Image (cartoon, grey):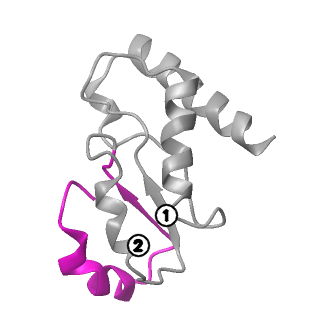
C-alpha cells in the first residue's frame, strides 16, 4: 500500500483477510507503523519497506538493520516481513541487486 493514513483504514485492512500486506514505509521514518503501536492487533504479516526504491542511493546493510530494529520496536518478529518499498520496476538491475543484497544481509545479521 502506498503512503496512507492507516489509522483511518486499519479495520478495512484487517477485514481484507490478507496473509501479508506491504507498506511503503522507507520515507516515513516508521511513522506509518504508529497504528500498530497504538494497540491495533493485526495478526497477518506486515512488510514495511526498508529501502526507498525511488532513490538511486544504495543503503548499507547497517542502515537497513537499524531500520528493521526500529520496526521491531513496534511489530512482533513473527509478523514482520522485510522487503523494499514497492516499485522495483522503476530501477535498473544494477541499482536493485546491491540494494536487495544489503537487505538480505541485514536480515541475516539480525537473525543471528
Pointers 1 and 2 in contact (C-beta within 8 Å): yes
Above or below 94: residue 87? below
Q: Quadrant of the N terminus?
A: bottom left
Above or below 56: residue 31? below
Q: Position of residue 76 (x, y in %)?
A: 60, 67
- In terms of secondary structure, where does tag 2 sit? helix
- In terms of secondary structure, where does tag 1 sit? loop
Q: Residue at x 23, y 76 (%)?
A: 7
Q: Quick check: 31 left or right of 79?
A: left
Above or below 50: residue 56? above
Q: Position of residue 67 (x, y in %)?
A: 48, 41
Disc 1 versus disc 2: distance between alpha carbons?
A: 7 Å
| Residue that protrudes farthest toward the right in the picture | 112
Q: Pointer 1: residues within 10 angstroms few (<14), some, or many (20+)?
A: some
Q: Quick check: 11 left or right of 106?
A: left
Q: Position of residue 25 (x, y in %)?
A: 32, 49
Q: Position of residue 101 (x, y in %)?
A: 58, 23
Q: Residue at x 42, y 71 (%)?
A: 37
Residue on which the image places disc 2: 36
Residue on which the image places disc 1: 74
Q: Quadrant of residue 6?
A: bottom left
Front residue (pair 95, 62): 62
Q: Residue at x 66, y 66 (%)?
A: 78
Count of numbered labels shown in the rendering = 2
Q: Quick check: 33 left or right of 46?
A: left
Sequence order check: which comes first, mark 1 or mark 2? Answer: 2
Q: Quadrant of the C terminus?
A: top right
Q: Quadrant of residue 22?
A: bottom left
Range of residues picked out in magenta: 1-25
Amino acid at each position: 500500500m502506498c503512503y496512507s493514513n492507516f489509522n483511518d483504514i486499519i479495520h478495512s485492512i484487517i477485514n481484507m483477510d490478507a496473509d501479508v500486506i506491504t507498506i511503503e514505509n522507507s520515507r516515513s521514518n516508521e511513522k506509518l507503523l504508529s497504528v500498530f503501536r497504538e494497540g491495533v492487533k493485526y495478526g497477518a504479516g506486515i512488510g514495511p519497506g526498508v529501502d526507498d526504491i525511488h532513490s538511486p542511493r544504495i543503503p548499507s546493510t547497517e542502515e537497513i538493520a537499524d531500520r528493521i530494529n526500529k520496526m521491531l520496536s513496534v511489530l512482533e518478529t513473527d509478523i514482520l516481513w522485510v522487503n523494499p518499498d514497492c516499485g522495483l520496476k522503476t530501477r535498473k538491475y544494477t541499482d536493485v541487486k546491491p540494494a536487495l543484497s544489503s537487505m538480505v544481509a541485514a536480515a541475516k545479521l539480525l537473525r543471528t
